[in-house]
């Protein structure tokens, strides 16, 4: 079960799924009340539907055949939608992983089946509220596959409070003190906001823009300090992901009234001479430009920061030239 190279075939996969269905107890309140076949069967299915990494043609073919055999039966996906609500955390975990595999390899087919089942998307969004970190973290990855290139699912997910849930995860992880989980959270937000005006409006109306500001802190001056923080690679990745979210939100067709501290924080990032690459500072400055374009209120907020813009730009350009290898488009930006 540790290798996806095992070509089970459709009859075997159907039998394994039937064992799960036969052995599960829908009314189970704890892991101990589940039948003995549920966990190992799910784990087997996860292993044989996981995309192989070695590039071996035989493994790739076996993986594709196994995935096709599972996804070709809608009832298999329906069963997984029921299992995500199980009390056993390992059953939940394997179910989420299996759904991720199916959505990754058979995206359109799986999305159609999930949309055909009432409240299915809602139950998947609810996984982000689970107290178990393993399930919650896997659910973040699952959501990325679920919403990929599907505006209908993206809107359903947004209307089910996904912005509040995901920002809550970033807060629980400590914002910039977090790691890959915060980056995954921000990637999900960025995908939901990209070219989706309905979701952009929901994000703004839910006062979510202000909740991004703590993810930018550390890129400028520390509060009450004359020094600036040199960001670690981990914090820099979170900062970049946050700027991407803002970039997907602040489009020419979608103008936002800036929270008071947003312009100041973005300018502080652009003015930071140490620890932040010039392209990142340029991106922060471009976001300031988008915020103030045609928005007198935002322009007034910018002036009130007391940060002089021209020296920030000239200093940034000088640093970029000194670093060498600067693309003309990047310098123009």
Image (spheres, rainbow, N blue to C red):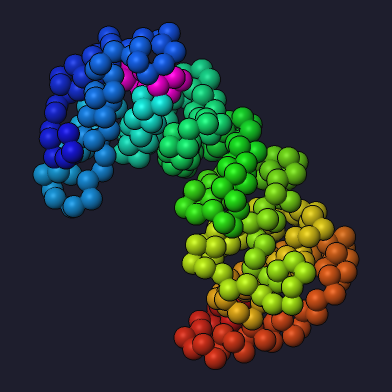
**On the rendered structure, is 111 left or right of 158?**
left
Provide the major secondary structure of the magenta segment. helix
The quarter in which the C terminus is drawn is: bottom right
Residue 253 screen position, x and y as percent: 70, 54
Query: In the image, what residue occupies the spot 58% across and 62% down?
Result: 239
Residue 11 screen position, x and y as percent: 15, 19
Q: Is residue 82 magenta?
A: yes
Q: Is residue 205 above or below residue 269?
A: above
Q: Is residue 65 visible?
A: no
Query: In the image, what residue occupies the spot 53% across and 47% down?
Result: 185
Residue 153 screen position, x and y as percent: 52, 33
Query: In the image, what residue occupies the spot 75% across and 41% down?
Result: 205
Q: Is residue 257 above or below residue 311?
A: above
Place residue 280 in its image quadrant: bottom right
Q: Is residue 213 visible?
A: yes
Q: Is residue 208 above or below residue 153?
A: below
């Amino acid at each position: 079960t540790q290798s996806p190279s095992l070509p089970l075939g459709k009859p075997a996969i159907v039998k394994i799924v039937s064992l799960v269905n036969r052995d599960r107890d829908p009314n189970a309140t704890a892991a101990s009340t589940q039948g003995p076949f549920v966990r190992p069967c799910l784990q087997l299915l996860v292993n044989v539907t996981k995309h192989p990494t070695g590039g071996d043609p035989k493994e790739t073919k076996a993986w594709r055949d196994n995935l096709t055999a599972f996804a070709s039966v809608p009832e298999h996906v329906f069963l997984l939608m029921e299992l995500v609500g199980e009390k056993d955390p390992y059953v939940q975990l394997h179910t989420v992983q299996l759904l991720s595999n199916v959505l990754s390899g058979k995206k359109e087919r799986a999305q159609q089946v999930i949309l055909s089942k009432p409240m299915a998307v809602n139950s998947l969004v609810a996984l982000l509220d689970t107290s178990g970190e393993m399930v919650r973290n896997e659910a973040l990855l699952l959501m990325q596959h679920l919403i990929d290139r599907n505006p209908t699912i993206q809107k359903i997910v947004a209307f089910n409070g996904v912005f509040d849930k995901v920002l809550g995860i970033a807060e629980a992880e400590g914002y910039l003190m977090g790691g890959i989980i915060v980056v995954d959270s921000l990637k999900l937000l960025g995908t939901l906001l990209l070219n989706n005006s309905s979701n952009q409006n929901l994000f703004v109306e839910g006062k979510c823009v202000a909740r991004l500001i703590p993810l930018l802190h550390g890129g400028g001056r520390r509060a009450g300090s004359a020094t600036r923080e040199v960001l670690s690679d981990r914090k820099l990745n979170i900062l970049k992901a946050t700027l991407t979210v803002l970039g997907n939100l602040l489009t020419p067709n979608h103008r936002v009234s800036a929270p008071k501290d947003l312009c100041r924080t973005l300018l502080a990032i652009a003015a930071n001479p140490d620890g932040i690459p010039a392209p990142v500072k340029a991106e922060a400055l471009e976001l300031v430009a988008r915020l103030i374009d045609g928005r007198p209120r935002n322009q007034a907020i910018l002036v009130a920061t007391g940060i002089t813009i021209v020296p920030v730009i000239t200093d940034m350009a000088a640093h970029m030239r000194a670093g060498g290898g600067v693309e003309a488009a990047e310098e123009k930006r």
